[in-house]
């Protein structure tokens, strides 16, 4: 195992990842006031990002066989129903995850 | 401080589950390729980006050039640009802890700090953000070390348990949906991502989706500010 290569790779990934995370703050986070349009964008982004992240998590869903999408669909519905009913995050996540594990391991 | 810590801990419980499991999986895989616990620990401590660490294993074993490594990291992690953009104000007055807060801004941490947690006084916000970030980071590191350490000894079928993170994002999405009357940004996020997923495929859809979202929301914000 080439040690220098391994640690070099890790260093590059760490640096680029940190760079991406710091960049917006370096560009817009100085002493000057945040530009108006960014303030608005920043206020609207969380709503859009969560939608994007949900899609991102489900990006490998496929329709070639029932096992590729039915478990995810049912488990998401379970999360939604439990959350809308209890209005608590934890029970919804636990119920949805147990449902997904059961469906993937036992049913499909 | 104790009350804030308790709140932060309970808020991070879903992440605890997800990170222990995903970190564990990462530890197992990296060990199975002959890398040591030290590397698993260093990566989770210093990179701290789940999907990228999984991708890194492929890059390492494939002997990818450092340029390819940098480019892949840029593509996989570009979405983090968004988190910074929408946390500019919240992290503005974080003082000495700001660099760590920014460094530790993962998908999951973002999903917890991008909304107002009820019962956190204005002056304790930074403490709360800091503890949420720190706890999540600790779970991730613990998971990967455990995975590298004992992963091969355990035979527990955990298939499907990573759904915990999908479920977390879904509950945050629902929470935000119920908390506002303006659903356009949420709809844009979902529709743009789905459209780009169909057009560009599951490996390459994130960056085009981000561009479409940023553009649509900017136009929307401009229109609103003209009317308001």
Image (spheres, helix red, strand yellow):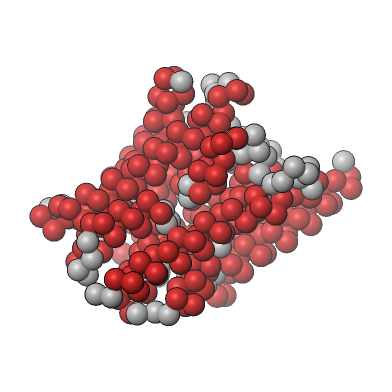
Residue A103, picture quadrant: bottom left
The answer to whether residue B225 is seen in the rendering is yes
- On the picture, is B19 further left or further right than B192? left
Quadrant into which the N terminus of chain A falls: bottom left
Residue B134, picture quadrant: top left
Q: Where is residue B45 in the image (x, y as percent from the top left)?
A: 37, 51
- On the picture, is A16 further left or further right than A65? right
Identity of the residue drawn at 59% across and 67% down: B207
Judged from this view, the residue extending furthest toward the left is B153
Foreground pick, B55 / A108: B55
Is A43 situated above or below B216? above
Identity of the residue drawn at 49% across and 71% down: B70
- On the picture, is B35 further left or further right than B80? left
Q: Where is residue A93 in the image (x, y as percent from the top left)?
A: 38, 41
The answer to whether residue A100 is seen in the rendering is no
Foreground pick, B142 / A100: B142
Quadrant into which the C terminus of chain A falls: bottom left
């Amino acid at each position: 195992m080439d040690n220098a290569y391994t640690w070099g790779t890790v260093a590059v990934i760490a640096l680029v990842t940190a760079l991406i995370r710091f960049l917006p703050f370096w560009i817009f986070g100085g002493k000057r006031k945040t530009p108006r349009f960014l303030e608005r964008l920043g206020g609207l982004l969380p709503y859009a990002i969560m939608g994007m992240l949900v899609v991102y998590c489900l990006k490998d869903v496929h329709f070639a066989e029932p096992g590729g999408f039915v478990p995810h669909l049912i488990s998401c519905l379970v999360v939604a129903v439990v959350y809308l009913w209890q209005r608590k995050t934890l029970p919804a996540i636990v119920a949805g995850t147990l449902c997904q594990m059961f469906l993937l391991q036992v049913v499909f | 401080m104790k009350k804030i810590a308790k709140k932060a801990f309970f808020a991070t419980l879903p992440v605890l589950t997800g990170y222990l499991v995903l970190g564990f999986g990462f530890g197992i895989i990296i060990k199975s390729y002959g890398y040591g616990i030290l590397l698993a620990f260093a990566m989770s401590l210093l990179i701290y980006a789940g999907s990228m660490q999984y991708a890194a294993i492929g890059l390492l074993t494939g002997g990818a050039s450092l340029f390819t490594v940098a480019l892949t990291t840029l593509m996989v992690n570009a979405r983090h640009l968004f988190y910074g953009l929408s946390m500019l104000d919240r992290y503005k007055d974080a003082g000495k802890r700001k660099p760590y807060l920014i460094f530790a801004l993962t998908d999951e941490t973002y999903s917890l700090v991008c909304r107002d947690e009820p019962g956190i006084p204005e002056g304790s916000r930074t403490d709360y953000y800091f503890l949420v970030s720190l706890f999540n980071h600790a779970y991730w590191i613990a998971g990967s070390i455990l995975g590298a350490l004992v992963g091969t000894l355990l035979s527990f079928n955990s298939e499907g348990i990573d759904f915990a993170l999908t479920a977390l994002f879904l509950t945050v999405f629902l929470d935000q949906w119920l908390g506002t009357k303006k659903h356009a940004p949420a709809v844009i996020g979902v529709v743009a991502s789905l459209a780009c997923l169909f057009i560009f495929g599951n490996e390459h859809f994130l960056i085009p989706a981000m561009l479409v979202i940023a553009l649509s929301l900017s136009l929307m914000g401009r229109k609103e500010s003209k009317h308001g």
